[in-house]
Image (cartoon, rainbow, N blue to C red):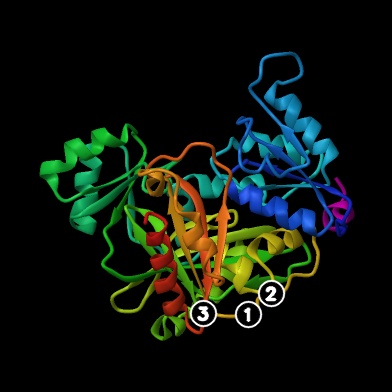
């Protein structure tokens, strides 16, 4: 594909493809369609959230001639002006195959980097970016060696495929190492120093093929059971002092790794006020859902713009915002009391169309705008609690 083709703006009326059919793909689809694009989804689940909204669904895994994964990828790539991601745990080979026929943003190389925690942390560290201290561990004995250098406790994570707390465990010391190691069922593990942090923050950044880069303000995040619970923006005033440093890091990552598309950097803020990269997501991020109502341009519209090499929108906040996740646990006692949400005009309810609720599954979210993000966060949690009343 020529450089001109790679960099030419993709205009409304074109088809865009998405690898992955979850809620991020669903919200990307909504944004792209509003802007005049058609969207095709590649996902093996028939009724996945994105497929309910998309114009076409490429469905691998069905029996029958012509449904071979590589054949479907080639077909989608030939019909789409560009393909992007909403989920990083997909085979890199699919992106490489698609890139022979169309623009793929982000690249297979950047996806490969983000898929492997060892590779990601090593390359970030080698490029001079601040990360949490880590070591590669392939045996329990190598964890002991890591503990000598980093000290207990350690966070042990599988190098690949973990998210929302899956594929990770805390080892307090040598006494519980054997059980912790066994639980991961992997011989390629990253052993990280357990960070005593003051806050967790994230920053969403987009870069287009012309090299324009735009970052959203820092978003302050609270987790529960390793799953994002509540996000708010602006962050508290103390964290806002780290804004320019975080932007510099995100801009550097975008340029160092030649990222085209949208990505999110998750940071820990240490007790002495230092930013440390936890991980990089090569796609929109759960914490960025509040941009839909809170900003002039949502993270999903910005993703469309970056992928299509359109001008990016410098993010402007309309009003302080907070987002609260709705997990399947809310359905434990039956259908939630949706009238409790609809009776509050300040509530923005998003449901993802997932047919079955179970504990820990992200089923939707609430966004609240208010005079301050802390007030918005309080209201979001109050409204969420009222869904069970």
Residue 318, label in figure: 1
Residue 6 within the magenta-colored segment of the rendering: yes
Residue 370, label in figure: 3
Q: Residue at x 84, y 36 (%)?
A: 78
User: Label 2: which residue?
Assistant: 296
Taking depth in this image into account, of 134 and 299 the one nearest to the observer is 299
Taking depth in this image into account, of 108 and 14 the one nearest to the observer is 14
For label 1, count other residues whose C-alpha is less than 10 Å away and answer few (under 14), some (14-19) or many (20+): few
Majority secondary structure of magenta residues: helix
Task: Find the distance from the CA under tag 3 to the CA under tag 2.
Answer: 16 Å
User: Label 3 near label 1: C-beta < 8 Å?
Assistant: no
Task: Find the distance from the CA under tag 1 to the CA under tag 3.
Answer: 10 Å
User: Label 1 near label 2: C-beta < 8 Å?
Assistant: yes
Name the image quarter holding residue 182.
top left
**Rendering coords of residue 9 (x, y %):** 86, 59
* Dot placed on the residue nearer the N-terminal end, 1 or 3: 1
- Left or right: residue 44 versus residue 74 is left
- Say what secondary structure mark 3 lies in: loop
**First to last magenta residue range:** 1-7
Name the image quarter holding residue 313.
bottom right
* Dot placed on the residue nearer the N-terminal end, 2 or 1: 2
- Say what secondary structure mark 1 lies in: loop
Residue 28 within the magenta-colored segment of the rendering: no
For label 2, count other residues whose C-alpha is less than 10 Å away and answer few (under 14), some (14-19) or many (20+): some
Q: Quadrant of the N terminus?
A: top right
**Rendering coords of residue 254 (x, y %):** 62, 64
């Amino acid at each position: 594909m020529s450089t001109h083709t790679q960099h030419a703006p993709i205009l409304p009326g074109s088809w865009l493809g998405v690898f992955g059919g979850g809620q991020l793909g669903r919200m990307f689809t909504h944004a792209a369609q509003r802007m005049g694009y058609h969207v095709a989804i590649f996902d093996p689940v028939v009724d996945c959230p994105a497929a309910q909204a998309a114009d076409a669904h490429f469905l691998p895994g069905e029996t029958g001639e012509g449904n071979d994964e590589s054949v479907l990828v080639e077909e989608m790539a030939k019909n789409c002006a560009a393909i992007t991601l909403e989920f990083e745990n997909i085979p890199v080979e699919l992106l490489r195959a698609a890139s022979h026929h169309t623009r793929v943003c982000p690249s297979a190389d950047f996806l490969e980097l983000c898929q492997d925690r060892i590779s990601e942390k090593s390359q970030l560290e080698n490029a001079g970016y601040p990360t949490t201290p880590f070591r590669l561990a392939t045996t329990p004995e190598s964890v002991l060696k890591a503990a000598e250098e980093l000290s207990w406790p350690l966070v042990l994570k599988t190098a690949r495929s973990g998210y929302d707390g899956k594929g990770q465990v805390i080892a307090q010391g040598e006494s519980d190492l054997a059980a912790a190691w066994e639980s991961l069922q992997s011989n390629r593990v990253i052993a990280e120093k357990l960070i005593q942090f003051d806050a967790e923050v994230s920053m969403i950044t987009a870069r287009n093929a012309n090299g324009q880069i735009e970052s959203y303000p820092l978003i302050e995040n609270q987790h529960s059971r390793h799953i994002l619970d509540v996000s708010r923006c602006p962050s508290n005033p103390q964290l806002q002092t780290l804004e320019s440093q975080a932007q510099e890091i995100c801009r550097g990552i975008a340029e160092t790794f030649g990222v085209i598309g949208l990505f999110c950097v998750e940071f820990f803020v240490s007790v002495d006020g230092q930013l440390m990269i936890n991980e990089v997501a090569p796609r929109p991020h759960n914490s960025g859902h509040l941009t839909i109502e809170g900003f002039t341009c949502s993270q999903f519209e910005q993703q469309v713009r970056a992928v299509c090499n359109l001008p990016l929108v410098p993010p402007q906040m309309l009003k302080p915002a907070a987002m609260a996740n709705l997990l399947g646990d809310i359905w434990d006692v039956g259908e939630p009391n949706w009238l409790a949400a609809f009776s509050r005009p300040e509530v923005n309810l998003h449901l993802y169309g997932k047919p079955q609720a179970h504990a820990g599954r992200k089923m939707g979210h609430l966004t609240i705008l208010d005079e301050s993000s802390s007030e918005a966060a309080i209201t979001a949690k109050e409204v969420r609690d009222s869904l069970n009343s």
